Each structure stands twice: as C-alpha cells, then as structure tokens.
Amino acid sequence: MHNGNFQKLSTTLTKLAIRETKFKFLSLLVTFKRELNLFTYKAKKMPKAKAKVKSKPISKTRGQKSYEIGVKLENRVAQWLKSQFGYKCKKRDLARGKISKRPYEVDIHAIKEELFGVFKTHLWVECKAYTVKRTHVTKLVESARDVKDAFNDNIEKWSPSMLMLVSNKGFDIDALGIANKYKIYCVNAGKTFDFVSKRKREHLEDKEESNY
C-alpha cells in the first residue's frame, strides 16, 4: 500500500471514530437530559414535608368569656337570694308566653314558699354582665306581660309577681327611670349587692310586687 493511500485511510478512520464518539456523546447527553427531566417531574409531584409549627394555646373568644362571666354572675345571685331571702332558685328556667311561639328563658326563677308550699311568690331575675339600658328593662316588662297573659289563660303554670334586674356593670339613668315606673328591683352586683332603684331590700323582704 502506498504511503498516500495509507494516510487517506487513516484520516478516514479517524474521522469515522470521531463521528461515532460524537454520536455516542450526544446519545448519552439526550439520555441524561431525559432522566433529569423525569427526576424533576417526580420531585414536583412528591408532597412537601410540612414544617412543624408549635401550636399556640387556643384563646377563648369574647363570646365564651362573656358566657362564663354571665354564668358566674347567675350562680352568685342565686346563692345570694337563697341565703339572704330564703328563695329556691331555678336557673335558665323556661316560661311560655301567650303570643310568643318560643318560650322565654328566665335567668333565675326564684320561688318563695309559705305554708308548706300552699302560697308561692315568684320572682323573675335577669342577670346582665354589662350596663343595663332602658331597652333591657322594656324587654323584661314585655316578656313578663306575655307570660302573665299565658298564666291567666292556663297556658303557663306560673307568672312573676316581682321583676328584678341584676348587673355587675351598673345601670343607665334611663333604665332606672323606667324600672322605677314599673317598680322593678334593680341591684348592682359589686363586692356587695346594692339596691339602686326605688325598690329596696325591705320591699323585697315584704314581697312587694312589681307593677307591670
């Protein structure tokens, strides 16, 4: 073989070898990219681990706090009426009205029995953990009137002869004015129980009725 032919053959083989190497490299590169894309896709699909967050203690809502304060006030008032005046107390008692389809919820239904239960005095007590406004007084009067009408028509078994509002935040001046009109007992529940309307402790002891 001549020298010139040998060189041509050698050059051709070298080019073929380079071409084949490039082809293999490109094939490997394509395969690598395909595998990389597949791995990225799977990684995106996998659920991410959530970082642990320290749970904070659940704070009570304003409504829950108000409810608890109201319950404590009712318990305190019921104990006061029992120990100081000898009343038996039913908390959250229901009373049917003549007009209202749903019964009224009475915070405290206080009952004073005499002559072995032959005579009974019924006291309707509403407890408010906020300042009493005139609307609260008129609502109590209207509710009591409806229950009284139901009692007169033999729909309800009892009706209140006395009405009382107890607040641990005091009374609006207009509320006291309307309460005095209907001779409703208004009591401020601070460190002690203070009668703040014209109806005083001695009137309650004598069971003097409200005029509604």
Image (cartoon, grey):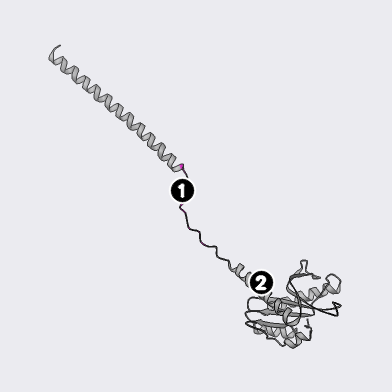
Judged from the image, the secondary structure of the residue bearing numbered disc 1 is loop
Q: Position of residue 181 (x, y in %)?
A: 74, 85
What residue lies at 55% left-to-right and 65% top-to-bottom? 59
Q: Magenta span has 116?
A: no
| Residue tagged 2 | 71
Res. 76 visible in picture = yes
Q: Position of residue 200 (x, y in %)?
A: 72, 87
Q: Estimate the spatial distance between the alpha carbons at disc 2 and disc 1, rounded to whole Å.
A: 45 Å
What residue lies at 31% left-to-right and 30% top-to-bottom? 26
**Dot 2 amino acid type:** Val
Rendered view: 18 above or below 99 = above
Rendered view: 13 above or below 48 = above
Q: Name which quarter of the figure residue 33 lies in.
A: top left
Q: Which residues are magenta?
A: 45-56
Residue farthest left in this picture: 3
- Nearest the viewer among 44 and 12 is 44
What residue lies at 73% left-to-right and 78% top-to-bottom? 82
| Residue tagged 1 | 49
Prevailing secondary structure class for the magenta stretch in the rendered image: loop
User: How many neighbours does mark 2 have within 10 angstroms: few (below 14), some (14-19), or many (20 or more)?
Assistant: some
Q: Magenta span has 48?
A: yes
User: How many neighbours does mark 1 have within 10 angstroms: few (below 14), some (14-19), or many (20 or more)?
Assistant: few
